[in-house]
Image (tube, rainbow, N blue to C red):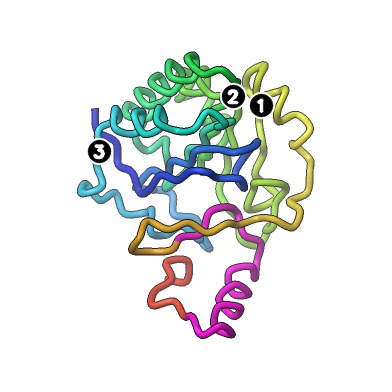
Amino acid sequence: MKIRINRVHYPVVVLGHGRRAGIWTQGCGIGCAGCVSRDTWDPDPATEVDVTAVADWCAGLPGDVDGVTISGGEPFDQPEALLVLLEALHAWRATRDRPVDLLAYSGRSLAVLRARFGPHLALLDAVIPGRFVAVRAPGNRWRGSDNQELVPLSPLGHERYDTEVDRPAGATRIQLGSDGERIYHIGVPAPGDLAALEAALARRGLAYEEASWRS
């Protein structure tokens, strides 16, 4: 089974509980206005990899991993591949010495996810559903706009996320990562955060050649 992947990253500390693995799928048929991840929209077949390769990457992570966050793109645009990935991650985490929660983002509503993706939700500990609405930004912690919910789905999800449902975002919203050729932002910036970062870099003589969030 193949799945389109934009990137993977560890550690991620701004998209869920603790130190996490981040998996960003490639391809989004929703295309929310104001999205800062437009580089993940194109369902480019050249980004396809084996689901087993993603699962193997997770298996090689350090023992201190607390969870996996799956974002995009729109993960649920690849329902068959996503389900296979979730099943592999569910089996992998059962071998770990500490709890690992699985959290996914989706631009679809919670009602649609429950109606069409029940097997996926059964393997997740929490989900953040709903379109990003720029005029309603920022949202609460880990959410781009205030219409988006954080929905615990399992006992582990309730243990880790019940207290986060109404928690404000706080100061730390984004971190930077690199794959050697590009620098990318991880997290959920508030309005103005990326422009402020760009200005701070410019004061140090650094400039973006391209910025997907501005395209």
Q: In the rendering, at what x and y percent does residue 52 appear?
A: 29, 27
Q: Nearer the viewer, residue 206 or 43?
A: 206
Please tell me which of labels 2 and 1 falls first in the chain.
Answer: 2
Q: Mark 1 points at which residue?
A: 152
Q: Could you tell me the amino acid type at mark 3?
A: Val
Q: Mark 2 points at which residue?
A: 125
Residue count near mark 2 (Cα–Cα under 10 Å), binned few <14, some 14–19, many ≥20: many
Please tell me which of labels 3 and 1 falls first in the chain.
Answer: 3
Quarter holding the C terminus? bottom left
Under circle 1, the secondary element is strand
Q: Picture quarter containing residue 50?
A: top left
Q: Which of 98 and 86 is in front in this view?
A: 98
Q: In the rendering, at what x and y percent does residue 55 appear?
A: 36, 28
Q: Could you tell me the amino acid type at mark 1?
A: Pro
Against 210, residue 67 (above or below) is above
Against 167, residue 96 (above or below) is above
Under circle 2, the secondary element is loop
At x 70% / y 28%, what residue is drawn?
Answer: 160
Against 189, residue 115 (above or below) is above
Marks 2/1: CA–CA distance? 6 Å
Q: Picture quarter containing residue 130?
A: top right
Do the residues under discs 2 and 1 have CB atoms within 8 angstroms? yes
Q: Could you tell me the amino acid type at mark 2?
A: Asp
Left or right of residue 51, residue 45 in this image: left
Q: From which residue to which does the magenta span run?
A: 184-206
Q: Mark 3 points at which residue?
A: 49
